[in-house]
Image (tube, grey):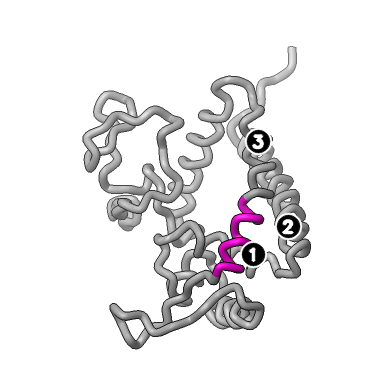
């Protein structure tokens, strides 16, 4: 009889699978961006600006969101402005900051990028019944863990939110007073408030 894999073996295989997905997603993103004569970062910025806020449409917020150096994001934004896809104006709420906005051409480009992203959504949607929710829940657990470890700097998921509860073993949002099924969990919630207990230093042993 074959020996069942131990937890370490499963973890190693999971990391291998994530690496394969990362390679595939990087290649896909490069193809989508190149088709519009954009860099992958420029394409990602258009997507984030079209979907947000959050994050706020400022370079300092965007570089934290994407975990990319601020000068690199600034250069990408400058390129998008030169291509007529983004504008930069003083933020009425804080004149010291420049607020970024998509132009009509930028919105059109972001819509086109979102359309290509739909190919990946369809692939995930083709998983067997229940598998998609299992994958989502597992990934959210991993994001919460990596956020706690400082690997992921920005996380606005249900599992990293102070309003998330599991009083009876089921997900519950205290803000909305609503029970959540696995498929209801959010990856980027605009009402998110960080659960500071997740970032607390561990008690000394």
- Structural distance between the alpha carbons of marks 2 and 3: 16 Å
Name the residue carrying label 2.
32
Quadrant housing the N terminus: top right
Report x, y in % for residue 44.
60, 63
Name the residue carrying label 3.
122
Q: Residues within 10 Å of mark 2 (few under 14, many from 20)?
A: many
Report x, y in % for residue 109.
64, 62
Q: Is residue 113 magenta?
A: yes
Q: Residue at x 65, y 49 (%)?
A: 115
Q: Residues within 10 Å of mark 1 (few under 14, many from 20)?
A: many
Report x, y in % for residue 25.
70, 51
Q: Is residue 203 visible to us here?
A: no
> In terms of sequence position, does the residue under pointer 2 or pointer 3 come before the other?
2
> In terms of sequence position, does the residue under pointer 2 or pointer 1 come before the other?
2
Magenta span of residues: 104-114
> In terms of sequence position, does the residue under pointer 1 or pointer 3 come before the other?
1
């Amino acid at each position: 009889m074959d020996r069942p894999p131990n937890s370490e073996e499963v973890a190693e295989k999971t990391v291998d699978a994530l690496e394969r997905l990362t390679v595939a997603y990087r290649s896909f993103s490069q193809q989508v961006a190149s088709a519009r004569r954009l860099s992958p970062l420029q394409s990602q910025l258009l997507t984030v600006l079209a979907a947000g806020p959050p994050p706020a449409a400022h370079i300092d917020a965007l570089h934290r969101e994407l975990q990319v150096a601020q000068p690199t994001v600034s250069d990408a934004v400058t390129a998008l402005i030169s291509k007529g896809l983004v504008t930069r104006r003083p933020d009425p709420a804080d004149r010291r900051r420049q607020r970024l906005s998509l132009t009509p051409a930028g919105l059109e480009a972001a819509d086109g990028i979102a359309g290509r992203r739909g190919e990946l959504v369809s692939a995930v949607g083709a998983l067997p019944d229940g598998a998609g929710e299992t994958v989502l829940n597992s990934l959210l657990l991993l994001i919460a863990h990596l956020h706690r470890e400082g690997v992921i700097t920005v996380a606005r998921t249900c599992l990293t939110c102070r309003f998330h509860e599991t009083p009876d073993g089921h997900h519950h949002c205290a803000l909305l007073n609503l029970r959540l099924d696995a498929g209801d969990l959010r990856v980027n919630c605009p009402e998110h408030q960080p659960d500071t207990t997740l970032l607390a230093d561990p008690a000394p042993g």
